Image (cartoon, rainbow, N blue to C red):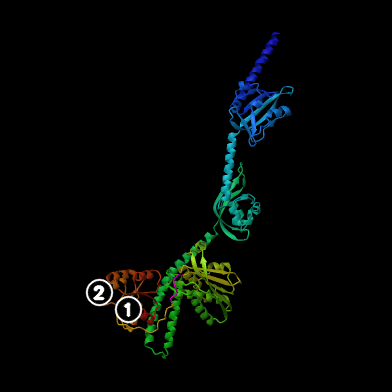
Amino acid sequence: AIEMALYKHKMERRLKEREEWLSTTLASIGDAVIATDMKGHIIFMNHVAEFLTQWKQEDAIGIPLKEIFKIVNEKTRKPVEDSVEKVLREGIIVGLANHTILIAKDETERPIDDSGAPIRDDKGNVMGVVLVFRDVSERRKTEHALRQSEERYRTLFEDSRDAIYITAREGMFVDANQSMLDLFGYSREEMIGLNARKIYVNSDDRNIFQKEIEPTGSVKEYEVKFCKKDGTKMDCLLTSSVRQDDDGSILGYQGVIHDITERKCIEAQLHQAQKLESIGTLAGGIAHDFNNLLMGIQGHASLISLDIDPHHPNFQHLNGIEAAVENGANLTRQLLGFARGGKYQTKVIDLNKLIQINSEMFGRTKKEINIHTKYQKDLWPVEVDPGQINQVMLNLYINAWQAMSRRGDLHIETSNVVINKNDAKSFKVKAGNYVKISVTDTGAGMDKATLQRIFDPFYTTKVMGRGTGLGLASAYGIIKNHGGIINVYSEKGSGTTFEIFLLASEKQVIIEEKPAAEILMGTQTILLVDDEDMILDVGEEMLRKLGYTVMLAKSGNEAVKAYKKHKDEIDLIILDMIMPDISGSEAYDIMKEINPKIKVLLSSGYSVNGEAKEILERGCDGFIQKPFNLTTLSRKIGEILDLS
């Protein structure tokens, strides 16, 4: 009996220890725990369950679970069958459906997850149910924040103006935003699953891309050529990074694509402009010096022609010399056509009339060409240098004639067009009204390589010794200097079309009467200023032949000194622009301070545009382009001195 009592005491103590251990364990876990008997009455609650239900264990013991553990569907607000009832009925572990709300004693509501399991005795009989549940409010907040974040980034992904893509390592597109689809011209269904190699112009570039990105994990502004669905090729910059799993294995790539085709085009135009500017500066200097040489030849020829009978055997030789001078002057005009300040004297003109005259003249010399013209009625006026535009047109005609192997059809058309802001921005011109000239031939056409260089100075497709390579380059320079556009379209075997756009003028065309070709004589005193001895010699003799008293100055400083000393005697100054000490511009300003009513005729191998134009705007009386003959000189002087 004593042994039985001791054994019973030992078992009771061990059972109590086990109950205390179990109670401590259940009280320590983070989930809420409620245990019930077979009738569903509560026999145990841990502290977490007390907190979530707002019931104390001592108050809840013996009360049916449904009075303590009140749960409803979050969406319908209908009561939900608790897990205990289901466990007791089915004898299995069960869980609550999603969207379950626990309503506490104080009416506080919390979203919960729970599960119930049967409590079995040693024989496997169900003795009760244990219910484990937890507050999922924080998890809900985290999930909601995650969904919001995903939606936000999805919105950024879809609304981004940049083309964004995600691919597998093998190359298949996994995702692409709308900008990516728009850029390449695919629908989402077409692009997802498409192999990225399909969008590379050169499929080997895909392998090169992988070799670049995988060692470093990313590439920035990687330049590559892509191809749209319709075959259009694009220059693009690719910024991309690798996608990796938790083990660091590469899953694929994600990145952004920028279409830089337009930028590359603008860069090419800028490069062309810079090239033309540097060559133009050189060409302008050559043209200036060459015009001075021609001035010496022209001046002496003019002087001889005054004293020789038209029937003299050498008279024809003089005419030949003057014709050669004119040809040389035309060459320098082409050089100045793309040199800085290439415009000469602009006028408001009717382009229809100018084109009609030069096309008919060309047609008379090239009768094997059939010329077809189509002129816009009421064509808008343009303010241009007629001589230079005439030169551009003749260059285009000659280019067409040579491209057609001397036979074919030449189509010339004029029209009024409006260039909007977007197109104007692309061509770097002002938006507004323009006059368009189209010149189309039926010649051999050009390949892409030739098209890219067609406006380069000294570039020619002609055989050696034929053509200077300046014609189209000067045409390009002239049109650009006029603030216009010149484009060319051609394919091998399909002819060529040149299009020119010149800004329309709101001014009216002024019809000028052509002055008589007579030489005007005078008796006044003229100060001739030039740093070239040859110009001074021939210029002095030409002026004396015209009846003038001549003073000479070989520099700007000499001119200022001479004018200070003889200002009351000097009626006119013929002033060179480019001189070694002080320029014609500086000399003009100094002498104008001495006498604000001073009369000055600028003379230069350069054009009237640029510095000469600025001096004219400051009050200078006129400009004469070297080389000039005696008649031109006499009439320019006559205009300023008001000679009848």
Compare marks 2 and 1 and give the one earlier in the sequence.
2
- Which of 315/92 is in front? 92
Q: Which of marks 2 and 1 is in front?
A: 1
How many numbered marks, from 0 up? 2
Residue 568 visible in the picture: yes
Say if 100 sits above or below 423 in the image.
Answer: above
Query: How crowded is the residue under tag 1: few (<14 C-alpha within 10 Å), some, or many (20+)?
Result: some
Label 2 residue SS: helix
The residue beneath circle 1 is 641
Quadrant for residue 10, please give it. Answer: top right
Left or right, residue 220 beside residue 309 = right
Report how far apart the C-alphas of labels 2 and 1 lie in the structure: 21 Å
- Which of 589/545 is in front? 589
Q: Position of residue 384 (x, y in %)?
A: 45, 72
Residue 215 visible in the picture: no
Q: Where is residue 422 in the image (x, y as percent from the top left)?
A: 52, 61
Quadrant for residue 586, please give it. Answer: bottom left
User: Does 508 appear in magenta?
Assistant: yes
Residue numbers of the magenta segment: 505-510
Amino acid at the residue labelled 1: Leu
Tell me, for residue 47, which label it has, or none.
Answer: none
The majority secondary structure of the magenta stretch comes to: loop
The residue beneath circle 2 is 565
Left or right, residue 238 beside residue 574 = right
